[in-house]
Amino acid sequence: MSTSRFASYPSLAGKGVFITGGAAGIGAELVLQFASQGAKVAFVDRDAAAAQATIDRCVAAGASHAPLFFELDLLDIAALQQACADSEAALGGVHVLVNNAANDDRHDWRDVTVEYWDERINTNLRHYFFAIQALAPGMIAAGAGSIVNIGSSSYMMQEDMFPGYAIAKSAVEGITRTMARTFGQHGIRVNTVLPGWVPTERQLTKWWSPEAEEQTMKDQALKYRIMPDQFAQMVLFLAADDGAGCTAQHFLVDGGRF
């Protein structure tokens, strides 16, 4: 398996895992990594073709459970809620939620309309809360669970290239800390993992330039790219029993950029 150089987490085997935005990029890597641990994975995304490629990749890697895919737009909260319910039924419960889906399109603050602002917040923040609302009751009933919210170091950058995205991502920290206190009494952990620059296909196609990479390497303590499979390892650790002592925290996986 492509994941064999990393740690194995026996506590993830057979666990139900729900991932948003799992068709491509970091999300697809998370689907692969959890499936390779023997977890039963369900994921949602808008891109059915990319989702099938991710499922095929998991099967080719030897996953014991082929991931379950639901095609939907996360702006449609009712569809998300239904996918959560269907996943719980199909997987025998959801023990791990990874809120990952986001969109970091660049925009100038001068051009932001009320409609675009609402779209940025709804795309990058709102569904995090409603996925938690849908799946936390099952975790409460089980007396355990792990919620991992994928944040972004973008709001730490103090760069004016996507204010709607950066502001929404900063609020992920508020969701994590608030819900960690709410659910701690039930044995449910809530954490944030923040990537730095992770060179997914989208990033390389839309935003990469030699100048940007040179600046990133200057900013990072580690002078190499942080790849999606490396980023995923922190998420696995927090989802597994190995991260049992961690909640209400944020973990940067950015090569020492911040």
Image: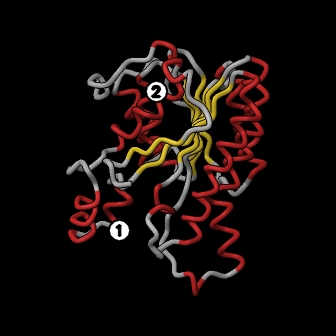
Decide if residue 186 is on the left or right side of residue 31.
Answer: right
**Is 127 rendered above or below residue 37?**
below
- Do residues under tags 2 and 1 come within 8 Å of each other at their CB atoms? no
Residue at 56%, 50% (x, y): give it.
101
- Helix, strand or loop at label 2? It is helix
Decide if residue 7 is on the left or right side of residue 133.
Answer: left
Residue at 70%, 69% (x, y): give it.
118
Residue 5 position in % (x across, y down): 26, 24
**Is 84 rendered above or below residue 34?**
below
Tag shown at residue 237 = 2
Determine if residue 188 is in view. Answer: yes
Residue at 49%, 69% (x, y): give it.
105
Q: Nearer the viewer, residue 4 or 176?
A: 176
**Is 119 rendered above or below residue 1?**
below
| 2 or 1: tag closer to the N-terminus | 1
Residue 78 position in % (x across, y down): 78, 48
Residue 174 position in % (x across, y down): 67, 50
**Is 146 rendered above or below residue 44?**
above
Dividing the image into 4 quarters, which one contains the C terminus?
bottom left
Mark 1 residue type:
Trp
Q: Name the residue under label 1.
A: 207
